[in-house]
């Protein structure tokens, strides 16, 4: 009994929902499509609750760090930034009806911390790429030489300076993107979709149970 | 014992990597602070096709702008979105915004305020422009929106969609009424092709971050009719709509940055092969 | 500009410089900025997600469809992830979301990313130089077939298949090179965006000399800490 409730029924729910939503993509029957639209709304609402997991996991991890007195300052900063934003935002939304995207303090948190943080973390990669280009990218084989050549031509082709160096560089860049790049990415897409469909079939047939997580 | 003197190439190979960081900072900062004024050059076919497609649309045709840019991708995608919005406004098109990610929502607000001067309080909001805000569950949300334009029931500001003039004369109330969906972001545009272009016939365009651009070509030009490649594409579109902005201003630094990386690759390889020890005779 | 906007810009500049300080070496300022970003991003994301879920739910509840409360109950079952005895309840919302994802994507993926890709390989013509109008399309088709053979593991790559596979890897390397070039372009664009913010936004640029001074102090202290090498 317990295995039925714990494993088999969730699996049956997954299969039923999968077929129901797949049917919506294949059939054109208004009552069915309307029901599927409501189903999509159900899934969107349920899926939104997954963010609770991120809040809970971060809180548990960093509260434990503070309790154990390891990285106290960093963990405290994280917890304060997260919970102050959440509490103030929820209060303003739940009791005063102000949307978080319009709430002044929440938007200042976004502009002061989230936006510059996200941008800077990725822009640091420009320096790392430069260092890697200088120290690690070596044309040791035909394949590596081809990779470096294609990369260099594309880099120069996308910058205005490339056309100033030679009028052939933009044409060569376009040819590389249109032909070998398209061929390579098309193969990646074709192979990828076969793998994804195989995985989905395995999930539906019950062979793939990783999504069920730990435990019995 | 004689000490081995290292060649210049060997010393360059072992140089502290922070000098490379400093060099990159100088190479990119210099043209930002003092622009050189390099001409942009030939505008790419991909950007031109997108521009011409939008240019050929009729007044009140609907285009959908899918803002999927994180703050990181916004440096490339936001100028493209602003330029496209200028174009759409000048053509009198109806624009529907939505965001599959939470941190893209402020960028739609910023674009509307920059181009239109206001967002929800603009006089044409609800008639020509609607912002649906964050649409949860990514592709599932997009599939829901494409099959039923009233999927969210309310816009980002809580207004009832059915009461808006924007949606009054739509024959199908789904993606068949859309003329174009433009993806802005760095994740994937495949889901737009899957959920909107193939089932409903609405072509996809792009104002994508450069990391994604190689993945656009397998669908180009049949499904993805045109796209702007990163900052360069945004600069090209700005020139086409005759509103040079952030993107055009960054192209000098882009040029020198790319040139620096290519030169570093070349010097690194020359140094590597020059500093490899030759076997000495008798050994 | 108001005091709060000024403070916001100064905070953004401080976060930017603290994160850039990682290029010198990992330090407390970098870790604080990183953790502040993670916490704020998580909090902001949750708020926007909650608001959008409410926007989907509220119209149906006001119509009297009270059974829609079930969606919230099922969504809360995600928290069972942290329970030892009731972990299995977490599988229900996961099954619904994953099943929906499978249903929505699988049929359409097979058409768009398999059949249509094969069709486009066979039919789309790219402009080719005179006098070979279909040269580029032919090269593309050859490249796709050869690259597919590279991934074909059922037979050993011997004889002619070895050369087919070799041509395939060359096409893949060109594609990866193009991806590398595009990635470089993207990262440099981001850096340009950050630098433009720092150099041209008032009062962000006032923090630049402060950062340079702190860096010089850091370098001097680092040099003093390092033991003299013989």
Image: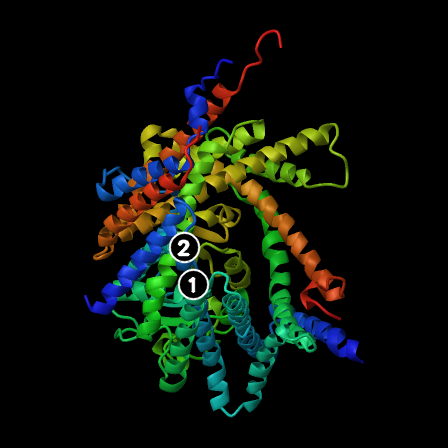
Chain letter for the residue marked with disc 1 in the picture: A
Q: Quadrant of the N terminus of chain C?
A: bottom left
Q: Is residue B9 above or below residue B178?
A: above
Q: Residue furthest bottom?
A: C64
Asked which quadrant contains residue A20, the reply is bottom right
Q: Residue at x 62, y 47 (%)?
A: C118
- Secondary structure beneath dot 1 equals helix
Q: Name which quarter of the figure residue B253 lies in.
A: top left
Q: Is residue C21 left or right of residue A198?
A: left
Disc sitting over residue C129 in the figure: none
Which is more toward the observer, A81 or A106? Answer: A81
Chain for disc number 2: C
Q: Give the image's coloring scheme.
A: rainbow
- The answer to which of A205 and B86 lies nearer the viewer is A205
The reply to whether callout 1 and callout 2 are in contact (CB within 8 Å) is yes
Looking at the rendered image, the quarter that the C terminus of chain C falls into is top left
Q: CA distance from mark 1 to mark 2?
A: 9 Å
Task: Kindly identify which residue carries mark 2.
Answer: C28
The residue at which mark 1 appears reads as: A73
Badge 1: few (under 14), some or many (20 or more) residues near its Cα, within 10 Å?
some
Residue drawn 47% across the image and 85% down it: C58
- How far from the left and from the top, in percent, is residue A3? 78, 76
Residue at 38% x, 62% y is A114
Residue B58, image x, y percentages: 34, 62
Q: Work out whether residue B53 can be spotted.
A: no
Q: Secondary structure at mark 2?
A: helix
To which quarter of the image does residue C167 belong?
top right
**Looking at the image, residue A12 lies above or below residue C196:** below
Give the side of residue B166 with respect to residue C160, left or right: left
């Amino acid at each position: 009994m317990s295995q039925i409730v714990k494993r088999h029924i969730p699996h049956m729910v997954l299969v039923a929902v999968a077929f129901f939503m797949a049917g919506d993509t294949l059939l054109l029957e208004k009552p069915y499509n309307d029901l599927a639209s409501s189903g999509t709304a159900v899934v969107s609402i349920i899926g939104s609750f997954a963010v609770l997991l991120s809040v809970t996991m971060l809180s548990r991890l960093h509260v434990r760090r503070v309790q154990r007195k390891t990285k106290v300052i960093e963990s405290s900063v994280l917890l304060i930034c997260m919970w102050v934003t959440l509490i103030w935002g929820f209060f303003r939304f739940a009791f005063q009806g102000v949307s978080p995207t319009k709430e002044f303090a929440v938007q200042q948190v976004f502009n002061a911390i989230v936006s510059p943080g996200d941008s800077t973390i990725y822009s640091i990669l420009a320096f790392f790429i430069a260092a890697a280009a200088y120290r690690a990218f070596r044309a040791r084989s035909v394949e590596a030489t081809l990779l470096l050549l294609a990369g260099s031509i594309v880099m120069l082709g996308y910058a205005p300076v490339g056309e100033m160096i030679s009028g052939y560089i933009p044409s060569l860049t376009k040819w590389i993107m249109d032909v070998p790049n398209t061929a390579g990415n098309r193969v990646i897409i074709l192979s990828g979709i076969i793998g994804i469909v195989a995985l989905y079939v395995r999930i539906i047939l019950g062979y793939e149970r990783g999504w069920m997580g730990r435990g019995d | 014992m004689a000490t081995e003197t290292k060649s210049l190439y060997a010393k360059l190979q072992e140089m502290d990597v922070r000098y490379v960081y400093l060099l990159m900072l100088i190479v990119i900062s210099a043209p930002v602070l003092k622009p050189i004024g390099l001409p942009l050059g030939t505008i790419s076919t991909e950007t031109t096709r997108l521009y011409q497609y939008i240019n050929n649309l009729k007044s009140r045709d609907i285009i959908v702008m899918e803002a999927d840019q994180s703050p990181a991708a916004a440096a490339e995608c936001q100028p493209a979105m602003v330029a496209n919005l200028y174009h759409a406004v000048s053509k009198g098109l109806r624009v529907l915004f939505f965001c599959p990610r939470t941190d893209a929502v402020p960028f739609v607000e910023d674009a509307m305020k920059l181009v239109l001067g206001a967002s929800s309080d603009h006089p044409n909001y609800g008639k020509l422009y609607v912002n649906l805000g964050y649409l949860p569950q990514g592709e599932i949300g997009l599939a829901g929106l494409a099959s039923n334009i009233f999927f969210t029931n309310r816009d980002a500001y809580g207004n009832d969609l059915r009461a808006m003039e924007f949606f009054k004369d739509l024959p199908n109330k789904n993606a068949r009424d859309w003329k174009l969906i433009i993806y802005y972001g760095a994740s994937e545009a495949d889901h737009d092709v899957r959920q909107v272009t193939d089932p409903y016939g609405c072509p996809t365009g792009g104002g994508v971050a450069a990391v994604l651009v190689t993945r656009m070509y397998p669908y180009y030009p049949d499904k993805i009719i045109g796209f702007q490649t990163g900052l360069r594409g945004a600069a090209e579109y700005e020139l086409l709509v005759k509103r040079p902005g952030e993107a055009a201003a960054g192209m000098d630094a882009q040029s020198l940055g790319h040139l620096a990386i290519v030169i570093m690759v070349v010097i690194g390889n020359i140094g590597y092969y020059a500093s490899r020890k030759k076997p000495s005779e008798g050994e | 500009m108001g005091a709060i906007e000024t403070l916001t810009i100064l905070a953004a500049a401080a976060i930017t410089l603290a994160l850039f300080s990682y290029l010198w070496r990992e330090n407390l300022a970098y870790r604080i900025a990183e953790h502040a970003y993670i916490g704020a991003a998580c909090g902001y994301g949750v708020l926007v997600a909650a608001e959008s879920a409410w926007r989907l739910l509220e119209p149906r509840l006001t119509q009297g469809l009270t059974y829609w409360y079930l969606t919230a109950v099922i969504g809360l079952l995600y928290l069972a992830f942290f329970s030892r005895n009731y972990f299995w309840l977490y599988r229900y919302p996961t099954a619904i979301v994953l099943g929906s994802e499978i249903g929505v994507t699988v049929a359409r993926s097979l058409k768009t990313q398999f059949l249509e890709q094969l069709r486009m390989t066979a039919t789309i013509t790219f402009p080719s130089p005179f006098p070979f109008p279909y040269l580029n399309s032919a090269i593309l088709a050859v490249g796709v077939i050869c690259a597919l053979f590279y991934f074909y593991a059922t037979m050993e790559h011997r004889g002619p298949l070895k050369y087919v596979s070799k041509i395939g890897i060359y096409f893949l390397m060109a594609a990866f090179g193009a991806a590398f070039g595009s990635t470089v372009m993207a990262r440099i664009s981001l850096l340009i965006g950050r630098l433009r913010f720092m150099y041209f936004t008032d009062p962000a640029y006032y923090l630049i000399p402060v950062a340079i001074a702190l860096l010089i102090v850091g370098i001097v202290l680092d040099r003093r800490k390092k033991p003299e090498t013989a």
